[in-house]
Image (tube, rainbow, N blue to C red):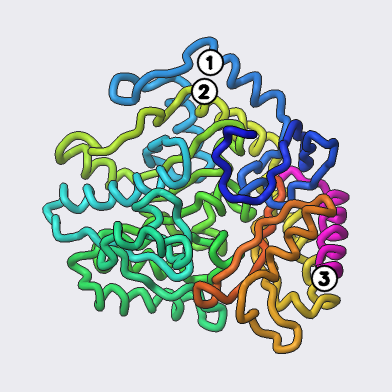
Amino acid sequence: MSNVFYRSRKSYPVAVRAEGVYLWDDTGKRSLDGSSGALVANVGHGRAGVARAMAAQAERLAFVHGSQYSSDVLETYATRLAAFLNLPGARFWAVSGGSEANESAIKLARQYHVERGEPGRFKVITRVPSYHGASLGALAASGMGARRELYAPLMREDAWPKMPKPDPGLTGEQDADRLRAVLEAAGPESVAAFMCEPVVGASDAALVPNAGYHARVAEICREYGVLFISDEVMAGMGRCGVPLTARLHGEAVTPDIVVLGKGLAAGYAPLAGLMAQGHVYDTVMGGSGAFKHGFTYAGHPVSVAAGLAVLDIVEGENLVAAAHERGAQLLAGLEALKARHPQVLAVRGTGLLLGVVLGDPATGQSDVTPGRAERVAARARELGLLTYPGSGAVDGVRGDHLLLGPPLSITPAEVDELLGLLDQALTDA
């Protein structure tokens, strides 16, 4: 009998080795990691250089508490990260995971307004659907009914007004203008921030707003004195073919807070965080003199060393451009699969954050009950392909989809292999 508390009652294979885009279990079965785990393993598995950097850091300095010390590796990484994202003057707050990072962003937005003398601002507007994390504050911010339902009694619902998800049928400006109505209904004097995923991830696979959306959102936020938080935990660090995903369409937009995770250390160590613009940092430090928040392992030197080594790979191997190129190849292949499989209602996304929308081929609409995505994903697993299935994108129940996001280091031949396995899974399922 195992002593592991598993996430569900399903049977879990035991992973024993990984290299590049492949994982092996204890039976010797090889699987192509078509979703980078949960879109985490951005530089691929088995990078010995990252392991060596972590070991060297652990030997030199494994831990300091953030209330007592900074570290040389954290100082170096923060500077490199700000340059990579083209966010000069931004300040990096390091934590251990995306949920912690979004919790930090929410609390930072709240304290920012208190320090400015506006303690009545506490609400954070988010979208439906959306997903910002599993911890209580991040989950309350999320627009995923199934994940929130059990814990709803613990949440103050009026603190989290919801905006509709991006509508591809509107221009980016028209789409973003709907934020104004939500702000007015909520009472703009009570709103601290608007938080969104620049490309929707797990809740509505790879839904991309049209050009102009983020620039107009930022404009409206400035008009109402609201902070704009770009949650790039999944979409960031080059996965969408640009360093900063809020600038996906070339828009000259700089969010007040950018939240990062997953791809920062690419699975080699727990690392996430936020980049706060100078005016946010200066307001908080110029008020009480401290951010009233913290985690024990925030800025952990070994995790940060992993992040620095991963950033070396991303920049040295030009993986941001590679994500753009391989993403175009994968999207074209998915379009070909859509033409052959009527249950594929749409394919979409950008870079290597791509979605396959599934539904009833007889009606061309979402299934009344979920299950199609999991059936396709289960057959894909049997064939040796890992995907990220989801449901509920339409109304919390209907709306099945698969999220695809292989490592940014995937080769053209491996993209073709992924497409072949998915083709077979769609046929069989």
Q: Name the amino acid type tagged 2.
A: Val
Q: Where is residue 25 in the image (x, y as percent from the top left)?
A: 78, 37
Residue hosting label 1: 58
Q: Nearer the viewer, residue 346 or 76?
A: 346
Magenta span of residues:
408-429
Q: Which residue is drawn at 58% across and 33% down?
A: 3
Q: In this view, does 396 lie above or below 315?
A: below
Residue 375: image x %, image y %? 73, 65
Q: In this view, does 400 lie to the left or right of 165?
A: right
- In the picture, the disc for residue 2 is none
Residue 302: image tag: 2
CA gap between label 2 and label 3 equals 43 Å
Alpha carbon separation for disc pair 1 and 3? 47 Å
The amino acid beneath tag 3 is: Leu
Magenta-colored stretch includes residue 415: yes
The one nearer the camera, 282 or 155, is 155
